[in-house]
Image (cartoon, rainbow, N blue to C red):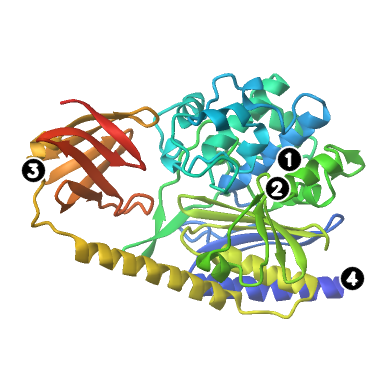
Amino acid sequence: MGLFLLTLLSLAIDSRVQAALKAWDVPGVAVVVVTPEHTLYLKGHGRRDAAGRPVTPDTVFPLASCTKAFTTALIARLADEGKISWDDPVRKHVPDFRLSDPAADALVVLRDLAAHRTGVGSHDLMWYRSPWSQAEMVRRVGRLPLAKPFRTEMQYQTVMYIAAGQAAAAAGGKPWAELVREKILDPLGMTDFCLTSTEAARRPDRAGGFREIGGAVKAVDEYPQPEPNCAVSAHASARELIPWLRFQLTGGRHGEDQLVSEAALRETQAPHTPIRLDAGGRAVNPDAHLVAYALAWVAQDYRGHLLVQHTGLIDGYRAHLTLLPNDGYAFAILANRQGTRLNLALSNTLVDLLVGLPGRDWNAIQRQALDEARAVAQVQARREDLARRPDLPPSVGLEQLAGEYEDAAYGKGKVVAGADGLTWEWGTWKLPLEHYARDTFRFRTDDDRLDRMMVRFRVEDGTVKGVHLFGVPFARTGK
């Protein structure tokens, strides 16, 4: 691409990024666009933190779940070396791994973990602000009941990726962090790539996160990730992602070196688990006919083109990596505000621009989809509020509901009675309970994961037997 055309492209991307920032009220974003041979665009926009310092191409952002693709690329390389296979039984490499369903437990292989098809639901609290080591997370996740039949439906499950990383470590004979540096990052020249928030904290050009709180966009504390986590802990700048994006485009090559065989890398981008397009999914992907989870990527059709992408979300940030394998483009969008759809809207906008499709107002399309989803949620919340019966008191006193409870997977928690009512305490969480009706309460919190979640006590003949929350039953164990 000549200098004149490259300048025109840069100006076109500039205008689209600025429009997206304005449409979504996001403080800052960094964008990089590459082909197998060239970097077409690399720039930061907006402010990186509450002090108003600018985003640059070297501003470091959390990649969150975009970390997962580094783990599948590592497994692909280990597979080339004959040390592991996607169809290995998980327990061949992780002896402690189990699934609660005997039939699924007998059949589960590494491919099932990476394709999110074990049948275990998301259960994000098994890792997010979890009180356990990663090894303990993996042991405990196998005690959860299957939410869907084995291999029938995609259910995003981060702890299963931690188990996949443990399998890679066992097969490679070293911790995941050492292996991914030795076999992926260092050969790609990504020597400054950060695998923890501690490493990222040493970088002077680092993004601060934001989210909407009480109707205003405010800075939020970073989610600490001091230990390498093969599912969520990577941090990088837009510039640092250039060799990674090219590696994905070229089928595992870096320069003249074939780091991972093309067949092994393409396997990570290939569809594995269909994703049903319900009304919400179609609103977000109005032009898609088929969407499927691959191995740390989502593969789909997009207006006649193959699109492979993945998002990452962590407190205050969103990341989005997009590949157009047949068209020869890849790009990354790193933003410092959670709770918006800037990344998806901008990704679609850039795809249209790069492959010469008629442009669409993706900011408006995604805004409408988000507004419709929020309207549905508001209707549901209103129905719950109308059905609430605080006049129907619990069948026992609050002091009798207070006590210790335990689940095989989530472990011990307790309900504490105080002057303001009941509070559920588990790990680092302390969540107030609002009475709903009879023996049902609900959480009221600023955390979107848990706000309005129902908490149902099981009381039989005046005796408190347990409580149901997080999708599992906790048994009463003591005062």
Give the residue drawn at x 75%, y 51%. Answer: 245
Name the residue that disc number 1 marks. Answer: 190
Residue type at numbered disc 4: Gly
Of all residues shown, which one is farthest toward the right?
256
Instruction: Residue at 77% x, 70% y: name it.
Output: 304
Q: Quadrant of the C terminus?
A: top left
Residue 73 relative to residue 206: left or right: right
Crowding near pointer 4: few (<14 within 10 Å), some, many (20+)? few
Mark-to-mark CA distance, 3 and 4 = 71 Å
Mark 3 vs 1: CB contact within 8 A: no
- Classify 10 Å Cα crowding around label 1: few (below 14), some (14-19), many (20 and above): some
CA gap between label 4 and label 1 equals: 28 Å
Q: Of marks 2 and 1, which one's residue comes earlier in the chain?
A: 1
Figure quadrant of residue 257? top right
The circle drawn on residue 419 is 3
The earlier-in-sequence mark between 4 and 1 is 4
**Mark 2 lies on residue:** 240
User: SS at mark 3?
Assistant: loop
Three-letter code, disc 2? Glu
Q: What crowding class fits label 3: few (fewer than 14 Cα within 10 Å), some (14-19), or many (20 or more)?
A: few
Label 4 SS: loop
Give the mark, 4 or 2, whose residue is nearer the N terminus. 4
The residue tagged 4 is 2
Tell me the CA gap for discs 4 and 2: 24 Å
Q: Are circles 2 and 1 on residues that touch, CB within 8 Å?
A: yes
Nearer the viewer's eye, disc 3 or disc 1? 3
Q: In terms of secondary structure, where does tag 1 sit?
A: loop
Residue 459 seen anywhere in this rendered image of the structure: yes
